[in-house]
Image (spheres, rainbow, N blue to C red):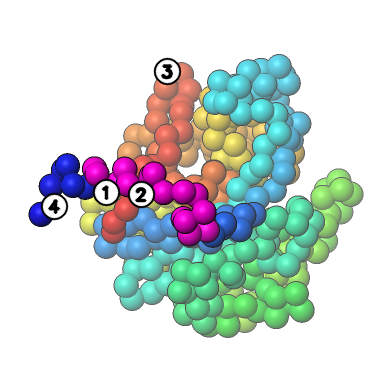
Amino acid sequence: MLNRRSILTAALSVAALPVAHLPALARAPVAGKQVAGIYRQKVGSIEVTCILDGFVPLSAQVFTGAEPAELKRILAASGLTEQLPTAVNAFVVNTGEKTYLIDSGTGSNTAFGPDLGRVQANLAAAGIKPADIDAVILTHAHTDHVEGLIDSGGKALFPNAELVLHRDEHRFWLDDSSMNRMPEGVRFLFASARKALAPYAKQTRLVTGGEIFPGVTFEPAVGHTPGHSVVRVNSGSEQMIFIGDIIHNSAIHTVRPDVGFAFDTDAAQAAASRKRIFDMIAADGLLVAGAHIAFPGVGRVLRDGPAFRYVPAEWRFGL
């Protein structure tokens, strides 16, 4: 008869066996890498899948308009150093009838380092086929958002997708005079955008704002680029806003929304847009999805005195 005493006696008997009589333990190999970067979040009846493209190694030096000592203090308060491995995220929005991809990652471009370009692999891990994407919505056309549109040979990876972006964004990256006004060191971004956008020329829709699909609205938040925009989705009483590059570091930009970023086209405009979007998010209680917030990139921006703070969403075990 099994009881506590008999179970304890049996356990002690096993423990007393000579080591030679025990079976050899198999050693699991060290994996050396993370599992697939996918995470799902419900917004009403809409299913959002967060897709990790990888990370780019940044440092605090890419932030402008604040003293290095202050940036160091802000980062330290969040347990961070001045070396900032920064996530690059894309997001799939499945309404049940249509499937939209918001931004596309870096694809095969290695300009920002070797630890990127995983959107396609992670889409596959999530069971999402490129041919099932009905539209790709771009927050803007920087390399880490557009080159995932194409393969290494420049062919469209989303053959059935309409491409949606702001009219001024499209105009800027295709305009030679705009390119010639920019510093030499960032002109590679123009070649990158042109290469990625070209295969979609006949399926591109240029917008300036408003509802672009049922339940999906597009709002300019310019400055980081001339047509940088945010995307809001709503279902029932729930809403999520995809903020693109409004945040490059959640510790720095919530405490100091006025701080610029090295790749801003107009840092002052970008700061004004950031503050306006933060005010809206906090007032409306929106769930946030950020391209450069630590994966899965989902959380909330809350008021914190004269500034804000970012609170990651709790991991959801069920949908």
- Disc 3 and disc 2 in contact, CB within 8 angstroms: no
Q: Give the residue type that dot 2 points to.
A: Val
Disc 2 target residue: 14
**Residue 2, labelled with which disc?**
4
Q: Nearer the viewer, mark 4 or mark 3?
A: 4
Q: Secondary structure at mark 1?
A: helix
In which image quadrant can residue 246 be found? Answer: top right
Q: Say few, some or many: other residues with alpha carbon within 10 Å of mark 2 (under 14 / 14 to 19 / 20 or more).
A: few
- Disc 1 and disc 4 in contact, CB within 8 angstroms: no
The CA distance from mark 4 to mark 3 is: 62 Å
Quadrant of image for the C terminus: bottom left
The CA distance from mark 1 to mark 4 is: 10 Å
Q: Give the residue type that dot 3 points to.
A: Gly
In which image quadrant can residue 256 be found? Answer: top right
Nearer-N-terminus badge (4/3): 4
**Residue 129, labelled with which disc?**
none
For image coordinates 71% across by 16% down, the residue present is 69
* Camera-side residue of 155 and 191: 155
Nearer-N-terminus badge (3/2): 2
x%, y% of residue 80? 61, 28
Q: Say few, some or many: other residues with alpha carbon within 10 Å of mark 1 (under 14 / 14 to 19 / 20 or more).
A: few
Q: Say few, some or many: other residues with alpha carbon within 10 Å of mark 3 (under 14 / 14 to 19 / 20 or more).
A: few
Does residue 135 appear left or right of residue 43 in this picture?
A: right
Q: Secondary structure at mark 3?
A: loop
Disc 3 target residue: 305
246 to 112, vertically: above or below: above
